[in-house]
Amino acid sequence: MGTRSDFFSFTTAKVIIAIESGWYERINQTRLYQYAFDHIGFECFDENAGYYISENAVKPQAVEPIDDLLHKITASGVELRVTPNLHPLRDAVLSSTLDDFSIIRFRNAAPHL
């Protein structure tokens, strides 16, 4: 069974994001928008992933485009890992002692090889 050090021993990053190589260009070409909201009316949906939800429609206080998303990710001190297929990593994480991870978008992964 893997431990945190199995995944983080060769990095100083506190956060690692792993993506499939098939998504690299899509992410690189995507313009993401950051919405800023008043925190009132939101509740934590997934603390580890940082997802908050509101049961009511909420108007954003600001909307800002984020260009060059891959640069923004890596410049923030996050380690970005690119792999041909996420299944082996997911299997290793799920069978490890890690308890602070998110794989909420795994349904977009390529089929298991």
Image (tube, helix red, strand yellow):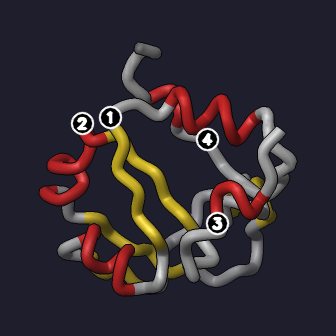
Q: What residue type is labelled 2?
A: Gly
Query: Tags 1 and 2 in contact by the CB under 8 Å rule?
Result: yes
Question: What secondary structure is found at the residue carrying circle 4?
Answer: loop
* Lower position in the chain sequence, tag 4 or tag 1: 1
* Lower position in the chain sequence, tag 2 or tag 4: 2
* Lower position in the chain sequence, tag 3 or tag 4: 3
Q: Where does label 3 land, which residue?
A: 8
Neighbours of disc 3 within 10 Å: few (<14), some (14-19), many (20+): some
Measure the C-alpha gap from mark 3 to mark 2.
24 Å
Q: Can residue 54 be seen in this view?
A: no
Estimate the x, y position of residue 44 in percent, counting from the top left: 79, 63
Left or right of 111? Residue 41 is right
Residue drawn at (70%, 80%), measured in percent from left and top?
39
* Lower position in the chain sequence, tag 3 or tag 2: 3
Q: In the picture shown, does residue 66 fall above or below 82?
A: below
* Lower position in the chain sequence, tag 1 or tag 2: 2
Q: Where does label 1 land, which residue?
A: 84
Q: What residue type is labelled 1?
A: Pro
Measure the C-alpha gap from mark 4 to mark 1.
18 Å
- Badge nearest the viewer, 3 or 4: 3
Left or right of 7? Residue 22 is left
Q: In the picture shown, does residue 76 fall above or below 29?
A: below
Q: Quadrant of the C terminus?
A: top left
Measure the C-alpha gap from mark 2 to mark 4.
18 Å
Task: Report which quarter residue 75 is drawn in.
Answer: bottom left
Query: Tags 4 and 1 in contact by the CB under 8 Å rule?
Result: no
Left or right of 76? Residue 10 is right
